[in-house]
Amino acid sequence: MTSLIPVYIKRAFHDNPLFTETKVVLSLYDDDFPDVMDKSIIDKIRIDGITNKDLKHYKTLNYIGMMKAAIDFSDGVILGSQRVNPELLQYIHKCNKACLEFQPIDRYIDAYNDFYEEILVNEPVAAD
């Protein structure tokens, strides 16, 4: 369900002063799940400011679709595992999103700090 946070922040709450200049960084792990959510969830997640186009990846309501939606509305992606779903890796690169590859324990703090700094100084990414 956290895949909704990027779309809510970037679309539904973008005019709220608390979120106007918010940057969203998504962390992906090897936590895929095979289940498909019930289609009625679409009506539950749609709120003012979110269009059908914004929810295009939620049509299948599976892990891949939900994560693609989160990627679309994120300013950057961190790979928190060595084995992130290959379809999602391909999608990140296709979208040309800022992406921090998986980092070993002895380097991740500096790498994360540098990545967050890069995200903070760049202009927000507009989702199509």
Image (cartoon, rainbow, N blue to C red):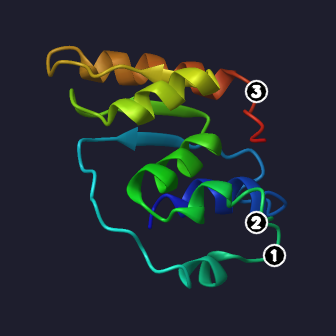
Return the x and y of residue 76 as percentages of the image width and height.
54, 31
Amino acid type indicated by mark 2 = Ala
Q: Is residue 66 visible?
A: yes
- Between discs 1 and 2, the one toward the N terminus: 2
Residue 50's place in the image compared with 108, above or below, is: below
Task: Identify the secondary structure beneath mark 1.
Answer: loop
Return the x and y of residue 14 as percentages of the image width and height.
79, 57
Give the left or right position of residue 120, taking residue 60 as reference. right
Residue 104's place in the image compared with 77, above or below, is: above
Front residue of 97 and 62: 62
Q: Which residue is mark 1?
A: 48
Front residue of 101 and 58: 58
Residue 12's tag is 2
Q: Quadrant of residue 101?
A: top left
Which class describes the residues within 10 Å of circle 3: few (<14), some (14-19), or many (20+)? few
Amino acid type indicated by mark 1 = Asp
Task: Identify the secondary structure beneath mark 2.
Answer: helix
Which class describes the residues within 10 Å of circle 1: few (<14), some (14-19), or many (20+)? few
Q: Which residue is mark 3?
A: 123
**Foreground mark, 3 or 1?**
1
Residue plotted at (77% across, 66% down): 50
Query: Alpha-carbon distance for marks 3 and 1?
Result: 25 Å
Query: Alpha-carbon distance for marks 1 and 2?
Result: 6 Å
Front residue of 5 and 55: 55
Residue 95's place in the image compared with 37, above or below, is: above
